[in-house]
Amino acid sequence: METELAELRACLNEPDAEDADFEEVVSAAVVHRDVKVKKMRSELSNGDNRSRTVAVYRYMLKYLKLIGITDSRNITDLQLCDRLTEKCQEMQINDFSHMIKYIGELAVKAEMSNSVISDGELETALSYFEIVKDKIVLPKLSGAKLLNAKFVYCLY
């Protein structure tokens, strides 16, 4: 928690901020972030394979939105995955578009059918999710965008 406070101070150019209100707001933001990150980790690691697969999909969409890969139209999840894949190609993120499509198709299978999501399918989706999160999104975030991802969206 102390490193996050120091990081916030540095970004706000207030290295010696001693204001009690500032400390309380920052502490509340850090605690809120910790709770949300723990909730995300819990949803990704606990429960049945179907609910975990849907959680992987939901969180993948949140991470991609951080870098502008999103579509707000009222379309099906499979159409959304096609649009996201197109946006990835527009941004020259071609190597990972099949991962986004895989996670989307698996989430539709989990949500809309009685099919069983195998442990192998879930593990593949989780590994693709980690790649999307760490290799696509994180390198494109810096400064204010990274703070936004950490403390507004509570994703890192």
Image: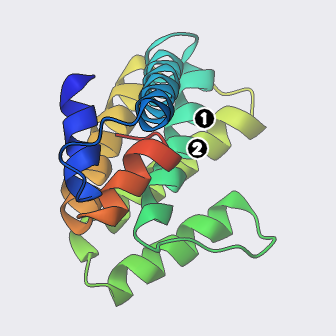
Residue 140 picture location, percent across and down: 24, 68
Q: Please, is residue 91 above or below residue 96 in the view?
A: below
Residue linked to disc 2: 58
Residue at (28% x, 42% y) in the render: 17
**Residue at x-position 31% and y-position 53%:** 132
In the picture of the structure, the residue carrying the numbered disc 1 is 54
Residue 23's tag is none
Asked if residue 16 can be seen in this view, the reply is yes
Residue 80: x, y in percent? Answer: 63, 68
Left or right, 32 with reference to 64 = right
Q: Quadrant of residue 113?
A: top right
Question: From what the image shows, is residue 8 above or below residue 40?
Answer: below
Type of the residue with mark 1: Val
For residue 127, side relative to residue 40 (left or right)? left
Give the residue furthest to the top.
Answer: 47
| Element carrying mark 2 | helix
Q: Residue at x 27, y 34 (%)?
A: 5
